[in-house]
Image (cartoon, rainbow, N blue to C red):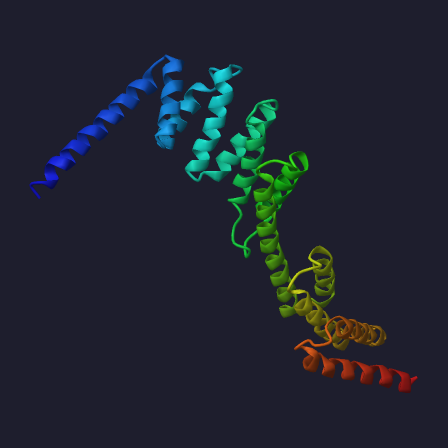
Amino acid sequence: MKRILPVLYVLILVGVAGCSKFRKIQKSGDWKLKYEAAIEYYEKQDYHRSTLLFEDILPIIRGTAEAELGNFYLAYAYFNQKQYILSAHHFEEFVRIYGRSDYVMEAAYMHAYSLYLQSPDYKLDQTITYEAVAAMQNFINKYPSSEYAPKADEVIDEAQRKLEKKAYEQCRLYYKIRRYKAALVVYDNFKDDYPDSKYQEDVACLKIKTSYDYAKVSILSKQKERYQNTINFYEAFVDEYPDSEYLREIEKIYQDSIKEITNFANSN
């Protein structure tokens, strides 16, 4: 304890001195002093103090060469504090204001990347994920040979996998809650949106089961058509997945649908 106390005392003194120095800079009317201190704090990874100083002086020095670099530092300072909403905003503003800057390409990438880092778990609303994908795609379109392009492709792939999982879970939900007509639309949308998905077989099976259940609860005048749809979906499934583990399960649905169609024919 006797050895620890002097060390703690020194640390407290250093902290107090650091705060005192920062307060003096913050109260100063010399923007150049604040600007240099903001950069120094940034380089020491004291992003919070750097942010405070940049936010204080940037409105004053707008239009200067220092403002360009200062805004770039400010966006990164927020990013390094994991304040991605603010970093996305400031990187986007940088691109808008400093379109000819040497830093504009990096800022455009960081804007999209900051959006991506806000992307939530797939179970939640994915609006920001769609925004990130769009921003990354715009970046690639504009800078296809950039050093950031490979990473941008990776980010898009990761985001698409999350969106794919979200869409697949939506398919399962629609089947579970028995919204038959809407479910069939959702399944078709999934096939169009994610043609190479590993979930395509599962969704195709759900489509057959949903179509069959829909036919069963339909009014009599619609049943024949909907049982025929089920048969068509089954035949397309077998063509595409001849060795599927679901074949035994959906074979019964197929046979029952043929039986219903036959009954309609006999009744007429």
Point out residue 76 in the picture as x, y percentages from the top left corner: 46, 32
Near-viewer residue (268 or 191): 191
Q: Residue at x 77, y 84 (%)?
A: 255
Q: Where 235 sits versus 118, above or below?
A: below
Point out residue 183 in the picture as x, y percentages from the top left corner: 70, 64
Residue 190 seen in render:
yes
- In this picture, residue 170 sits left or right of residue 230: left
Point out residue 79 in the picture as x, y percentages from the top left corner: 46, 36
Q: Where 2 sits versus 123, above or below?
A: above
Residue 219 seen in render:
no
- In this picture, residue 138 sits left or right of residue 63: right
Quadrant containing the N terminus is top left
Near-viewer residue (258 or 99): 99
Quadrant containing the C terminus is bottom right
Q: Quadrant of residue 46?
A: top left
- In this picture, residue 68 sits left or right of residue 77: right
Can you name the residue that lies furthest to the right here? Answer: 268
Figure label count = 0
Q: Residue at x 49, y 22 (%)?
A: 69
Near-viewer residue (37 or 175): 37
Q: Residue at x 60, y 62 (%)?
A: 169
Q: Where 32 sits versus 223, above or below?
A: above
Q: Quadrant of residue 95?
A: top right
Point out residue 140 in the picture as x, y percentages from the top left corner: 65, 39
- In this picture, residue 252 sits left or right of residue 135: right
Can you name the residue that lies furthest to the left here? Answer: 2
Can you name the residue that lies furthest to the top here? Answer: 30
Q: Quadrant of residue 26?
A: top left
